[in-house]
Amino acid sequence: MGSVRSRVRLLAALAVALGLAATVVLVVKAERAVAVEVDGRSITLAQPSPTVRDALAAAHILATTGMVRAVVSGRAITTGAGAAPITVNGEPASLATRVRRDDRVEAPPGPDTVEPVDEREVGGTFPGLPAVETGLWRLGRAGATRQVVGRFSGEVVSSTPIAGEVASRPETDKVVALTFDDGPDRTWTPAILAILKEQGVPATFCVTGSASRANGDLVRAERDLGHTLCDHTVDHPHLPRLSHDRVVAQIQGTADILTALVGAPPSLFRPPYGELSPAVIAVAQASGMRVLTWNVDSQDYRRPPVDRIVANVMEAVQPGSVVLMHDGGGDRSRTAAALRPLIAALRAQGYTFATPTSTAPATP
């Protein structure tokens, strides 16, 4: 018996000296109870039919899994790789395997594995755009690469160029964008949508979050008809007068409402009253949106005669113009009445229609 105990002490001491990476060896002696001796400590298992799990628990030893390691550096990321290859008397076993007198239990750590890899395309978008867009731009393309990266670590295994950079440039063709602010409105938005559909004209709707929440069906109608949605804050405040947190709430709040309504966030932001500050621009850009104002004001919000609305646009329009109009925020009957003659006048001068997200891409 003394020689068996000496052998157990020696094996246990070796396991402790080598740490968790060492193989754990237990020699089990049993008659009615099972005694486990590890590093000079004798632990008696009272279970009538003890298992490997009971033996390891009594010895305060874990059957550890292997490590998942980073694909390039090999650093340990997490556990949960290969399971511990437990054996009893050299034969594969599980934690539920029963142990008997004089059994030899070994529980080395599981084998390490290398994390899986994924392919991704990386690169920014639209290089060369100004921080604030007042007119239409032909959107460029950032140089792109295809990378193979570790799924958990993000470590780059390889990187292959797949596209060169193309800079954005101002639109110089006779293309114009019609934009409508402050809706959707239950009366005027449907009327304007019907005319745009009849004329085959795409437009940009800069919607408020409060109006969108109350008229979700109209927001979806704008999307379904192929128009572009633009974030115009929750309730149209003077943004530069607000704290940073309130600016975020106004901009991101509407983005969240639109995402919930149509399943995608807006890519454009228009500030109420055209009022901007560096902080407001930074918040919009941090939310993934381009900042859009205008360079032609129809002044329809003043409710001038219909022919004056048309003249305000035609006297200022040029290739790449972004025209400010309104479908909400008040009586927009004259805006709706001006829309057909305005479209006809623009077409008579050779203009076509686009949105800031649908203009033809720039070419190298």
Image (cartoon, rainbow, N blue to C red):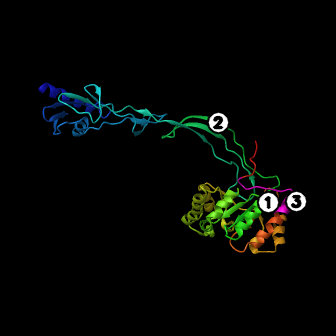
Q: Mark 3 against mark 2, which lies toward the viewer?
A: 3
Q: Amino acid at mark 1?
A: Gln
Residue lying at the far right in this picture: please name it. Answer: 348
> Disc 2 marks which residue?
161
Q: Amino acid at mark 3?
A: Ala
How packed is label 1: few (under 14 Cα within 10 Å), some, or many (20 or more)? few
> Disc 1 marks which residue?
199
Q: Mark 3 to mark 1: distance in Å? A: 14 Å
Closer to the camera in the image, 165 or 196: 196
Above or below for 144 versus 169 = above
Residue 52 placement (x, y as % from top left)? 25, 35
**Residue 287, quarter of picture:** bottom right
Question: 323 left or right of 272?
Answer: right
Question: 100 left or right of 264?
Answer: left
The mark nearer the N terminus, 3 or 2, is 2
Residue at disc 2, secondary structure: strand
Residue at disc 1, secondary structure: helix
